[in-house]
Image (cartoon, grey):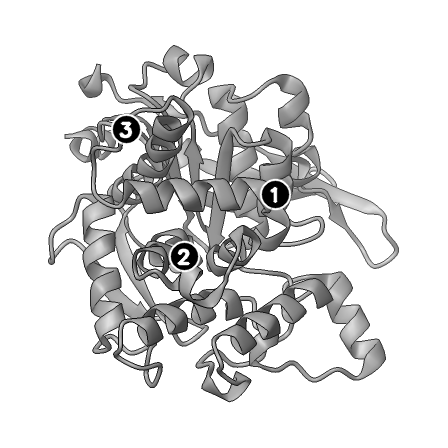
């Protein structure tokens, strides 16, 4: 019903606008869904039912299979390792060394990884690699932790690590079932496409993705309040929430949005980006979520229609601002992403961002 309601409104204001010296250069359409732990759509932008490849925003859900297989205990992986499994790291030296150590515990080689090497996400790391003539290997991939986790689950299950990334592998079949449970979808509710890192990425509606992340928040709240977990995979989801908020440096890296967001909110939420402008946030229950009319915590999911990654970060910061999640001081820690200042080759600021969009309340859910 929410999708039907939104189809009748004008989408012309659901944009982030980038300018250069006051001249509009680009308009970036934003789709978003804000959902509570009961699945109610509270707020939205654009089309909250948009089928979206969630890319690396799937990693926390994939990690559930790793925990439930018993792979953390079997191979001696700690909470920081789990965060790397859920992250898209910056290929910093600490990330690459951790990935190699994890491979050694698994008694596997880099050649077993089905993700290839690629340029790092971090410009600082890229400059270091160019200076040193470094050639990236699979362990340097932003997704190496994710792949190692899935390999570990595949190995302990007895299915073997060969073709662990294939949709036909038993561990991938288990991951599909887990995602269907967490997002509240049946077998036909999720579609699949091969991602950049050679792992298959699910596609679902933004509302379903937001519901999945709200479930992570609910699992964390249950642990904090010593409540019995009453829904599938909740214990693993609570462990994942804890790992991501305690080790935000492994979710992304120095100065990147996912890590800064986690550090700023200090356990109150975690966020995970995916390629081409998809992002999701799990927000634990608080006075802020209660004020919004949510039952428990909330999940936020968004997609930038043109896939712009920097605009994605700014959109998350603006949505948190409009929802007033966290104190003003906390939200100000995201200001560098929020402003989106455009600088030329001499470091001169030539433009920035403005946010004409306003989150729409879903009155049907009230």
Q: In the depicted view, which residue is nearer to us: 348 or 164?
A: 164
> Going from the N terminus, do you reach mark 1 or mark 3 first?
1
Q: Is residue 35 above or below residue 16?
A: above
Q: Is residue 83 left or right of 194 when viewed as pictured?
A: right
Q: Is residue 340 left or right of 69 when viewed as pictured?
A: right
Tell me whether the residue at label 1 lies in contact with that at label 3, contact meaning CB atoms closer than 8 angstroms: no
Residue behind mark 1:
18
Q: Quadrant of the C terminus?
A: top left
User: How far from the left and from the top, in percent, is residue 83?
Assistant: 52, 53
Q: In the depicted view, which residue is nearer to us: 52 or 264?
A: 264
Residue appearing at x 56%, y 66% in the figure: 142
> Going from the N terminus, do you reach mark 2 or mark 1 first?
1
User: How far from the left and from the top, in percent, is residue 237?
Assistant: 35, 44
Mark-to-mark CA distance, 3 and 2: 20 Å
Q: Quadrant of the N terminus?
A: top left
Whether residue 355 is visible, yes or no, is no
Q: Is residue 12 above or below residue 67?
A: above
User: How far from the left and from the top, in percent, is residue 149?
Assistant: 43, 66
Residue appearing at x 48%, y 60% in the figure: 85
Mark-to-mark CA distance, 2 and 1: 30 Å
**Comparing marks 1 and 3, which lies closer to the viewer?**
3
Question: Dot 3: what SS?
Answer: loop
Mark-to-mark CA distance, 1 and 3: 34 Å
Residue appearing at x 58%, y 38% in the figure: 262
The answer to which quarter of the image holds residue 163 is: bottom left
Residue behind mark 2:
59
Residue behind mark 3:
37
User: How far from the left and from the top, in percent, is residue 113?
Assistant: 47, 81
């Amino acid at each position: 019903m929410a999708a039907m309601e939104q189809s009748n409104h004008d989408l012309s204001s659901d944009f982030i606008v980038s300018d250069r010296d006051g001249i509009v250069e680009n308009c970036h359409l934003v789709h978003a869904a804000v959902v509570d732990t009961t699945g109610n759509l509270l707020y939205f932008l654009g089309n909250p039912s948009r089928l979206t490849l969630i890319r690396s925003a799937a990693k926390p859900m994939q990690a559930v299979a790793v925990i439930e297989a018993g792979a953390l205990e079997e191979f001696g992986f700690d909470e920081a390792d789990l965060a790397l499994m859920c992250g898209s790291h910056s290929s910093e030296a600490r990330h690459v060394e951790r990935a190699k150590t994890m491979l050694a515990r698994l008694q596997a080689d880099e050649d077993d990884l089905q993700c290839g090497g690629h340029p790092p996400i971090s410009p600082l790391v890229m400059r270091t690699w160019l200076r040193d003539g470094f050639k990236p290997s699979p362990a340097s991939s932003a997704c190496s932790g994710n792949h190692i986790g899935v390999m570990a689950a595949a190995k302990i299950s007895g299915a073997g690590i060969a073709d662990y990334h294939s949709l036909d592998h038993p561990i991938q079949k288990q991951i599909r079932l887990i995602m269907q449970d967490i997002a509240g979808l049946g077998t036909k509710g999720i579609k699949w496409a091969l991602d950049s890192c050679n792992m298959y990425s699910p596609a679902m509606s933004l509302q379903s993705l937001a519901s999945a992340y709200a479930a992570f928040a609910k699992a964390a709240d249950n642990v904090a309040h010593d409540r019995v977990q009453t829904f599938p995979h909740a214990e693993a989801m609570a462990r994942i929430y804890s790992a991501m908020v305690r080790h935000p440096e492994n979710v992304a890296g120095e100065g990147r949005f996912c890590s800064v967001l986690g550090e700023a909110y200090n356990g109150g939420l975690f966020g995970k980006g995916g390629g081409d402008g998809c992002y999701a946030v799990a927000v634990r229950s608080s006075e802020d979520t209660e004020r919004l009319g949510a039952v428990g915590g909330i999940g936020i999911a968004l997609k930038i229609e043109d896939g712009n990654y920097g605009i994605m970060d700014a959109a998350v910061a603006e949505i948190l601002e409009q929802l007033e999640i966290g104190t003003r001081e906390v939200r100000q820690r995201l200001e560098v992403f929020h402003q989106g200042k455009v600088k030329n080759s001499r470091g001169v600021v030539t433009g920035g961002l403005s946010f004409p969009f306003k989150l729409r309340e879903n009155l049907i859910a009230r």
